[in-house]
Amino acid sequence: MLNLVLFGPPGAGKGTQSQRLIEKYNLVHLSTGDIFRANIGGGTDLGKLAKSYMDKGQLVPDEVTINMLESEVNKHSDVKGFIFDGFPRTEAQAKALDAFLEGKGMSISGMVALDVPEEELKERLKKRAIDSGRTDDANPEIINNRIAVYKNETAPVKSFYEKQNKYYAINGLGSIEEITSRIFEVIDAIN
Ligand code: ADP
């Protein structure tokens, strides 16, 4: 199995690159942000809870997020692998994911991290806000908060995978195609 964690700050291009990876490697794409947004759209209790955090640029609590992610993984059997996009975002989530996968005889193959400078991220999020309609992209204060949360809570997840020799940094600047081929190169080396 090929189980990838796609990592990077808000606006790094995780969603765009995930689309290309699932096509090439036939993987199941699990984006916690997308799943939360689908729940918000469907008016579920989970959606209402998630929205109260997302609207402020804060993380949804670990327990809620971990439970949701595990039940999504359990919906799939006999698959070639998963792309975890936007998860794990805290060290607690990373530990929970390892333990959960181990219980299923699975493991993370590698973390692919997209490196993009902060100024470029802010530009991209501003542009995305225009066509995505995402309220958390439209407000500079919320964007700053998401970047701060990333630095404080999410960036440490990098060392979690580094310690396991599973961390691969990718230059996230360039054309979409260039970045895709950099990622393919890394995956083909570990797969
Ligand atoms: P981006 O990476 O562009 O910020 P996402 O769609 O991945 O966008 O996430 C949007 C929001 O959803 C986050 O700001 C956070 O509130 C919530 N969220 C997504 N994934 C997680 C997670 N793993 N843990 C906690 N909250 C999450």
Image (tube, helix red, strand yellow):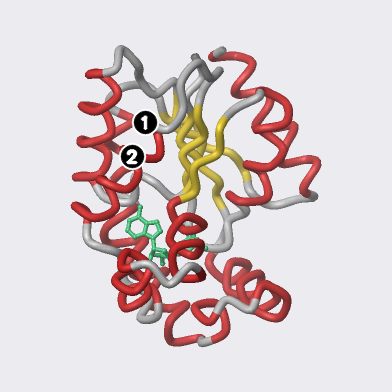
What residue is drawn where x is 66% and y is 24%?
A: 26
**Which residue is denoted by mark 2 in the rendering?**
71
What residue is drawn where x is 70% and y is 76%?
A: 127
Q: CA distance from mark 1 to mark 2?
A: 5 Å
Tag 1 and tag 2, C-beta contact below 8 Å: yes
Q: Residues within 10 Å of mark 2 (few under 14, many from 20)?
A: few
**Which residue is denoted by mark 1 in the rendering?**
74
In x, y percent, where is residue 83? 52, 34
Q: Say which of 47 and 1 sits in front.
A: 47
Q: In the image, is the residue at mark 1 within 8 Å of ligand 1 by its beta carbon?
A: no
Amino acid type at mark 2: Ser
Secondary element under disc 2, as helix, strand or loop, is: helix
Ligand 1 occupies quarter: bottom left
Answer above or below: position of 8 versus 60. above
What residue is drawn where x is 32% and y is 66%?
A: 149
Answer above or below: position of 113 versus 90. above
Q: Say which of 29 and 122 sits in front.
A: 29
